[in-house]
Image (cartoon, rainbow, N blue to C red):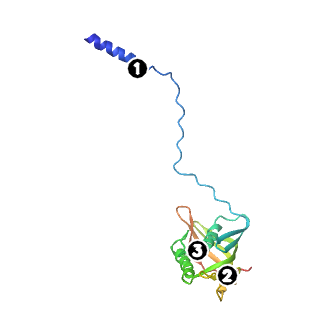
């Protein structure tokens, strides 16, 4: 019996798969990083750019040569708040901190409450970062909305009288703050005594 078991073990051992010849293992594929590399900042145009904001409203942005990327903060808020007005959206919150959100929302809601909208072409010019320190910056722009009309959002007709701020260029300044996520947000709108000429 012992011979039978021993013979059976030898037979079974010989029936296994034939050994494969040795081949060196391929180099392991490097692991993909879990965090995506930051994309390079989009380059801003140099010179004039026309942006369609909404139904019948545009803005001509006069970018300086080699513009600071921070200038996009003030341009985006101008386009965004005017777009909210044209669309009749209540409030505006994009890239704003609490104080600036309250200021922008109050301005936009006034249009909605009074059933007003805007039509025409505005102009942003003399864009500049007037101060920058650490995670804070002040960004200034001149705004000329003499080519814009206040209209009724119900009828589409111009309202009379037109507000004074549409007739004369004015300065707009914002204080922006860079959050821990790297995004610059407007902390507050500030009143500027600077005069803007056409």
Would residue 193 be seen by someone viewing this image from the given angle?
Answer: no
Q: Residue at x 55, y 82 (%)?
A: 110
Q: SS of the residue at dot 3? A: helix
Q: Which residue is mark 3?
A: 87
Q: Which residue is mark 2?
A: 149
Residue sitting farthest toward the top: 3
- Identify the disc placed on residue 16: 1
Q: Earlier in the sequence, mark 3 or mark 1?
A: 1
Q: CA distance from mark 3 to mark 1?
A: 76 Å
Decide which of 27, 58 is in the foreground and name it: 58
What is the x, y in percent for residue 69? 65, 64
Decide which of 70, 10 is in the foreground and name it: 10
Would residue 14 be seen by someone viewing this image from the given angle?
Answer: yes
Answer few, some or many: residues within 10 Å of disc 2's Cα (few below 14, many 20 plus, some between 14 and 19).
many
What is the x, y in percent for residue 180? 52, 62
Quadrant (top left, top right, bottom left, bottom right) of the N terminus = top left
Q: Residue at x 39, y 17 (%)?
A: 15
Q: SS of the residue at dot 2? A: strand
Q: Are marks 3 and 1 in contact (CB under 8 Å)?
A: no
Q: CA distance from mark 3 to mark 2?
A: 16 Å
């Amino acid at each position: 019996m012992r011979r039978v078991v021993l013979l059976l073990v030898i037979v079974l051992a010989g029936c296994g798969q034939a050994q494969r010849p040795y081949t060196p293992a391929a180099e392991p594929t490097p692991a993909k990083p879990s965090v995506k590399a930051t994309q390079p900042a989009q380059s801003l145009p140099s010179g004039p750019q026309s942006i369609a904001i909404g139904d019948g409203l545009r803005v001509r942005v006069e970018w300086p040569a080699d513009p600071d990327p921070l200038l996009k903060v003030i341009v985006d808020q101008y386009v965004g708040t005017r777009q909210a007005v044209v669309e009749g959206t209540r409030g505006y919150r994009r890239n704003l901190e609490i104080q600036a959100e309250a200021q922008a929302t109050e301005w936009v809601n006034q249009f909605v409450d009074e059933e007003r909208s805007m039509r025409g072409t505005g102009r942003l010019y003399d864009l500049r970062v007037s101060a920058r320190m650490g995670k804070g910056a002040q960004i200034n722009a001149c705004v000329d909305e003499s080519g814009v009309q206040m209209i009724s959002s119900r009828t589409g007709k111009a309202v009379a009288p037109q507000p004074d701020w549409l007739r004369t260029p004015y300065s707009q300044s914002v204080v922006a703050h860079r959050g821990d996520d790297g995004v610059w947000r407007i902390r507050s709108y500030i009143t500027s005594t600077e005069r803007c000429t056409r």
